[in-house]
Amino acid sequence: MGRHSCCYKQKLRKGLWSPEEDEKLLRHITLYGHGCWSSVPKQAGLQRCGKSCRLRWINYLRPDLKRGAFSQEEENLIIELHAVLGNRWSQIAAQLPGRTDNEIKNLWNSCLKKKLRQRGIDPVTHRPLSEAEYGDEEADKSAKSSQDAQDMPGAASGSSSTNELNLLSTPNSRQATSILEIENCSGLKTPSSFNRDHLFMVQDGYMPESSDFAGNYPAVSTQFSSDWVHTFVTHPDQFSTTSSKAASSSMIQPLSTSMLFPITVPPSMNPQLKPLIPFSENWDTGNNGNLSVFDNNVFGSWGLPAQQAQVQSLEGQPEYLQVQNQLLNMAVTLQNQTQHQSNFYSQMKPDINFIPSTSGAMWIQEEQPGGAPAEEEAVPDSDNTSCVKDVQRLTALFGHM
DNA sequence: AAAGATACCAACCGCCGTCGG
DNA sequence: CCCGACGGCGGTTGGTATCTT
């Protein structure tokens, strides 16, 4: 096996990157972009393979990376996403602006798996350990299918069995338990599977009424983390494929700008939200088997009470854009109400209200009505490591130029 | 204080899908 | 259609830091 083909051509450096190498790569990409990765090391004067450069850029040098410890909310979100996506780290990372798949993978392997086990939850199946280990036949079947989905992400289309998950929030959650349940949700394999199956979410005591489901199917891309609501709008193109992998991606994946529009709504706004997005009755009657939910007036409302949130049809504007606009307006309104963010990257939490990222994601955090910042789990300001790294990066970029 | 154990994380490895010739 | 280059992904490794005994 040995090295990747690009590494055979010449003797290339391996191992940790020196500050000088970082500087070269950072400067090169800042000035010229990366273009073809295989040509980057030569152009940048590096004795590395293109793959190594790409990895270094993505995992370390990218300017939009969020440094520092993961917040409790991020951890909860990762756990919830992992329950749905399995080890698809890149897709999970797509939901966490500023975090890399490698970072999340490391966190999972080093911390979250352990935490889940300590809580009696099997990190693979996301079911109670006792049930996962000694469960009845049905439990075994369910667990197995879930396991299959995670073991063979690429073979997802072949598996259409139950994918049940039951997530419990951390015992330390400030308010009510957040529970995300997906029942009989054919493994999120294809969007059309939602025609028969249903998915619902329970949060802070909210229990969807049966009428909520009458002919409608809630968007999977609304997530609850603690008492926050994470909502995503996915670009319709994401639904237009029958590829199992791409289809499952479409559920939560994202974002190359406008592909996904995540908004995190603070607890104080929850009363205004109804965590269901009606889906069209002919959800699965897409074009030749391809699903184009937006052709079918899927988004009749957006989390708000129906009478308040009917999407007005704007001539010539795709409905997903209308939804995005609604969310954007909401976000801007929030921003206007809470005018004290200053630097996007210097105060990620808890002070940031509105954080655009290059990936098109926005995170909104609102002040509590009393004016005090929304109470958050304690988030380490910025650990020494991240400081050192940031200094290193800045030095690399500017210190010698 | 030293040695061993454990945790953490950056980077590598190999596989796979896509694309262009 | 085939083949090679390339990018992307997930699993794994190895070095370093931290903790425990």
Image (cartoon, coloured by chain):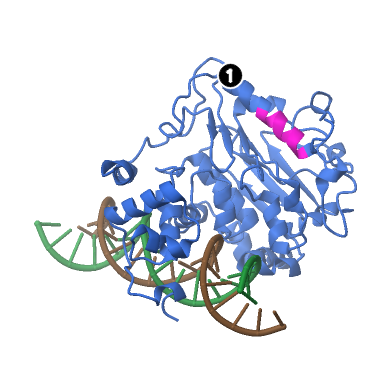
Chain colours: A blue, B green, C brown
Badge 1 density bin: few <14, some 14–19, many ≥20, Cα 10 Å: few
The reply to whether the magenta stretch includes residue A323 is yes
Residue at image point 89% right, 41% down: A214
Image location (x, y in percent) of residue A155: 69, 69
Query: Disc 1 designates what residue?
Result: A336
Q: Chain of mark 1?
A: A
Main secondary structure found in the magenta portion: helix
Residue at image point 67% right, 26% down: A330
The reply to whether the magenta stretch includes residue A171 is no
| Residue A209 occupies quadrant | top right
Identify which residue, A130 or A220, lies in the foreground.
A220
Q: Name the element at disc 1.
A: helix
- Does residue A93 show up? yes
Image location (x, y in percent) of residue A274: 74, 32
The residue sitting at the top extreme is A370
Q: Which residues are magenta?
A: A320-328
A315 relative position to A12: left or right: right
In the rendered image of this protein, does residue A75 appear above or below residue A349?
below
Q: Quadrant of the N terminus of chain A?
A: bottom left
Image location (x, y in percent) of residue A9: 39, 76
Q: Amino acid at mark 1?
A: Asn
| Residue A356 occupies quadrant | top right
